[in-house]
Image (cartoon, rainbow, N blue to C red):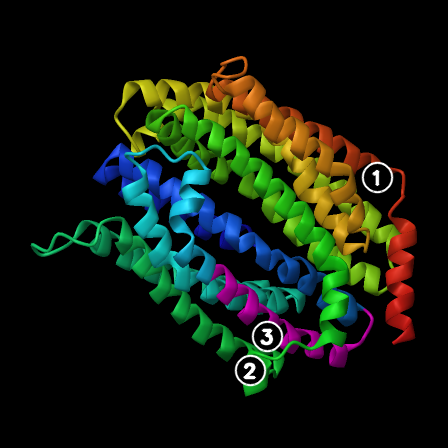
Amino acid sequence: MFLELLLGIAVGVAGTALAARLSDLSGAAFAMANHVAAMLFILFRIVGAGVGVVVSQNLGGGRRDAADAVSRAVLGASTWIGAGTAVVALAGAVPLMKLLNAPPEVLPLAVPLLQVLAPAMLLDAWNASMASVVRAHLHARDTLVVMVIMHLVHLGLAGPLMLGAFGWGGFGLAGFAVAVVVARSVALVLHLALWKRRLGLVPHREDWWRLRRAELAAVAHIGLPGAAENIAWRLSFMASIAVVGSLGATALATHAYTMQVIHLVLLFGLATGLSAETVVGHLIGAGQLHEAHRLVRRAMARGLAVSVGVAVLAALSAPWTLRLFTQDTAIIAAGTVLLWWTVLLEPGRTFNLVVINALRAAGDARFPVVAGAASLLVVLAGGSWLLGSEAGLGLGLPGVWIAYIADEWLRGLIMWRRWATLAWVPHARAARRRLAAV
């Protein structure tokens, strides 16, 4: 799972680097368009946050038939949600960019990129749901093979399509989106083959559009709270992006380049959290609550140690790594400062990446939403404005980072207390009873 995430992040880093070769304005526009695409794709979390847990629990409880029914049902849900986000991206690109305070010089570059990315949102919805099902069956290596091929196709096409080749000037930023669509199409074909070979599942025609209420109800029971938590985080994060956008194109480019380095840092904790979610789901389905508790404590300890170590290395190497994106000394200096702040940020983020996924896998999906909503709204979004914006204290990008740190630590410690005090156990037992009753 770590390798799969690394490949995905590497593609984003490569795309940012290619965009930055066009200009720092293009780098800022690339980041802005991808932020909006991620904001729209978060709607898919309604399905994505639930399908892996529900399938894992059914498999742990010996209910392969129920797991297969849920797997088929999420395809139809993915179609409707993916198509809806694509339409919004295509028709609402300009107002969405303006809502985020996109600088005037960035807007003409970011809008076309987002519109060309629209079809990829439907393909991503299908691929993500199918990959989640395969991982829930503990075939993570198979999904890695698909991701490797997809990202290799993407990387192979992105450079020539963006920058040109053999005398052709290329499509510019739109070339990245074209490469995304082609690569995601290849991945969909491979996932279909994987479902047939590994899982014995062949989707019927109606599976692609029909919404099956009974099967999706279990997914929504986990997915809606999980999606709400992710939507709350994404909207609050986008509020911070709006603050960064108000600081100008240079600040936006600095944020974009620094975040690419941070993505490489956080993937250690993210891989740990997603892996723990899958295994905890199996353990809960099998009624092994004590083992689930021990597993999460071990994952937490390892995640903290690794995240701090990697964050320190990223901060030490910042003057060199940031030169992969820009030669602007002001941007490099500002990004280096932000990466030292990240050494404080990453341990708090690890609490959230590991424990929230574990709580969701245990059936305790609503608590993270309720407990984290206030912090996301007040500390992340409000703190970014208060500390970072010129209308507030005017600390600029360091102020935004301080808000990030405070939010991650506050939510992380609340989630850890929830797990450590075993408040999730009644929800896990209820999930086990539901499986036994079916």
Residue 369 position in % (x across, y down): 74, 44
Q: Disc 1 versus disc 2: distance between alpha carbons? A: 40 Å
Q: Disc 3 versus disc 1: distance between alpha carbons? A: 35 Å
The answer to which of marks 1 and 2 sits earlier in the sequence is: 2
Query: On residue 418, which mark appears?
Result: 1
Q: Which residue is mark 3?
A: 76
Mark 3 residue element = helix
Q: Main secondary structure of the magenta part?
A: helix
Residue 69 position in % (x across, y down): 70, 79
User: Dividing the image into 4 quarters, which one contains the C terminus?
Assistant: bottom right
Mark 2 packing: few (<14 Cα in 10 Å), some, or many (20+)?
A: few
Q: Determine if residue 287 is in view.
A: no
Q: What residue is shown at x 69% (from left), y 43% (from top)? A: 354
Q: What residue is shown at x 62% (from left), y 30% (from top)? A: 380
Q: Which residue is mark 2?
A: 196
In this rendering, position of residue 208 left or right of residue 109: right
428 to 336, vertically: above or below = below
Tell me, yes or no, whether the highlighted magenta stretch contains residue 262.
no
Q: Start and end of the magenta stretch?
A: 61-86
Q: What residue is shown at x 29% (from left), y 19% (from top)? A: 329
Quarter residue 116 falls in: bottom left
User: Dividing the image into 4 quarters, which one contains the N terminus?
Assistant: bottom right
Residue type at numbered disc 3: Gly
Q: Disc 3 versus disc 2: distance between alpha carbons? A: 18 Å
